[in-house]
Image (cartoon, rainbow, N blue to C red):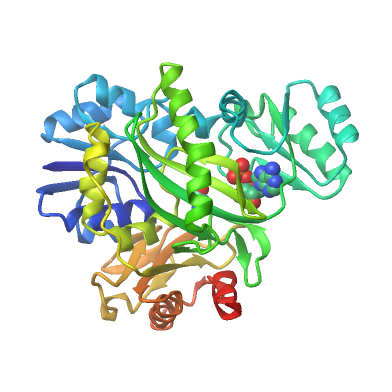
Amino acid sequence: MNILILGSGGREHALAWAVKQNPKCDRLIVAPGNAGIAALAECADIDILDGAGVVTFCEENAIDFVIIGPEAPLAAGVADACRQAGLLTFGPSAAAAKLEASKAFTKDICDACNAPTAAWARFSDPTLAKAYIRQKGVPIVVKADGLAAGKGVIVAAAETEALAAIDDILGGAFGAAGAEVVIEEFMDGEEASLFVLTDGTHALTVGTAQDHKRAFDGDTGPNTGGMGAYSPAPVLTAEIEAQAMAEIVLPTIREMARRGTPYSGVLYAGLMIDKGQARLVEYNARFGDPEAQVLMMRLGAQALDLMHACAEGRLADVHVNWADDHAMTVVMAAKGYPGPYARGSQIRGLEALPEDSRHMVFHAGTAERNASLVATGGRVLNVTARGETLRDARDAAYAMVDRIDWPGGFCRRDIGWRALQERRRK
Ligand code: AMP
Ligand code: GLY
C-alpha cells in the first residue's frame, strides 16, 4: 500500500512511525513532513489545504490511502475532495468535522441526542451575551464558535474578564471564527480524552490520554497546545469510559448519521470527569497532539490496520490488541513558548538515543540546516517512552530528555504528576 499522511507535527511523526512498521505499508510519503519524519518517510512540499492539489499528487504518486493529521485540511474539505476522487481516506468530511470547527454545532448535537455537557447559550449580539453573563454569574466559560488555534476559550473567574472576552471575540479578535460566541457553565472535575475510531456506524476505542496544557510545572503559566501527555488515563476507568461511549460518543455518531453527515475517522472526545460521571467538553476531529504520540507508541503497527478498516467501513471486523502498558511523552519547547521564541537554535545528542518500540523522539518543529538539527517551532520535540507502569514510562522519557543537548529548549519536569500521585494513594 502506498500511503500519504498530511501534516508536519509530532502527531504526524508518530502516525508515520506506527504506519511504517506495518508490512502492508510499501511507500510512505508525509506532506509537508519535518526533519524527523524525513528519517523514515519521503517528505513532499505540497499545500495540504488544497484538496484538488492533494488529489493530483495522489494520482501522480499512485497513493492508495490518505491519512489526514490536522484539523485545518479537514475543515477545508480535503477529505471530501479525496473521497470524491475515489481515494481511500482516513478523516471526516468538512460537514462532519464541524464537530471540531463549530462549538455551537457540537452543542446542538449534544442537545439533539441528550449527551451530558455544560449548559450553554449562543450569541452574536454583545449586549445579549453580556446580559446572559451577568445573569449566570462567574465562573463562566466564553468561547469563540470557530477554529481559533486553541486560543478562543476563556475560562473566566471574574465577570469583567468574561465581559471583555465578549468584546474581544465579537469585536473581531478571531476573525470569522468569532462571528458567534458560545457561553457555557463552568464544569469542575478532571479532564481526560477518549479516542474513538468510527466508520459512521461502528465505533472502536483506540485509547485514552491526559495532557498538560499549562507551560510550567505544577500546571501553572500560560496555556499551550500541550506540554506532555500519557496513556492510558487512569481517571477514565472502564465504567466511566462505558458511560461516555453510551451517553456521549455513540449518540453523537448516530445523530451525525441521521443528519446525513456520517462521521468517519477518529473522534477525540474531551471529557470532564466529576463524581464518576463524564460530560463532554469538546470534540476534535483528529488525533490529539501530543496525545497521538502516546497512543501510537502503544498501538504500534496495528494503527495502520485500524485506520484502514475505519476508512473502508470495516470497523466491525477488527479489534485492538491491547498491551497492558503505559506511555508518556514529554514536550521540549523553545524557550519563550507559548510567547515569542527564537528559531534556529541547534539541537544535539539525538543520534545517541535509543529508537525502538519503547523509545522514540518524535519531531514537532525541526529542520536540517548545514547537517545539523535546528528548532523551527514552539513545540519542537516529543520525547516518548513506554513502560510496564506509568512510572517506568516517565523515568525512561526523562532519561532521554536528560541526554538531549539543547540550551534553547525547556520542558516540564512533572508530566503525569496527577496520575502518579493517584497511584501512590491507592
Ligand atoms: P475547548 O477548546 O473547548 O476544549 O476548551 C479548552 C479548555 O478550556 C478545555 O480543555 C478545558 O480545560 C477548558 N474548558 C472548556 N470548556 C469548559 C467548561 N465548560 N468548564 C470548564 N472548563 C472548560
Ligand atoms: N493536545 C490537545 C489537542 O490536540 O487538541
Give the residue at x 49% y 31%: 251
Residue 425 placement: quadrant: bottom right
Give the residue at x 66% y 29%: 178
Residue found farthest to the top: 260
User: As drawn, is 129 to the left or to the right of 266?
Assistant: right
Residue 50 showing in the rendered view = no
**Count of labels shown?**
0
Please, is residue 147 above or below residue 159 in the view? above
User: As drawn, is 234 to the left or to the right of 275?
Assistant: left
Residue 258 placement: quadrant: top left
Please, is residue 26 above or below residue 398 in the view? above
Please, is residue 248 above or below residue 333 in the view? above
Question: Foreground: 425 or 161?
Answer: 425
Residue 179 locus on image (x, y percent): 66, 24
Residue 360 locus on image (x, y percent): 31, 69
Residue 414 locus on image (x, y percent): 56, 75
Residue found farthest to the front: 239
Give the residue at x 37% y 31%: 92
Q: In which quadrant is the C terminus drawn?
A: bottom right
Please, is residue 354 above or below residue 260 in the view? below
Question: Foreground: 58 or 140?
Answer: 140
Residue 413 locus on image (x, y percent): 55, 77
Give the residue at x 51% y 31%: 99
Residue 204 placement: quadrant: top left
Question: Foreground: 261 or 33?
Answer: 261
Residue 260 showing in the rendered view = yes
Q: In which quadrant is the N terminus drawn?
A: top left
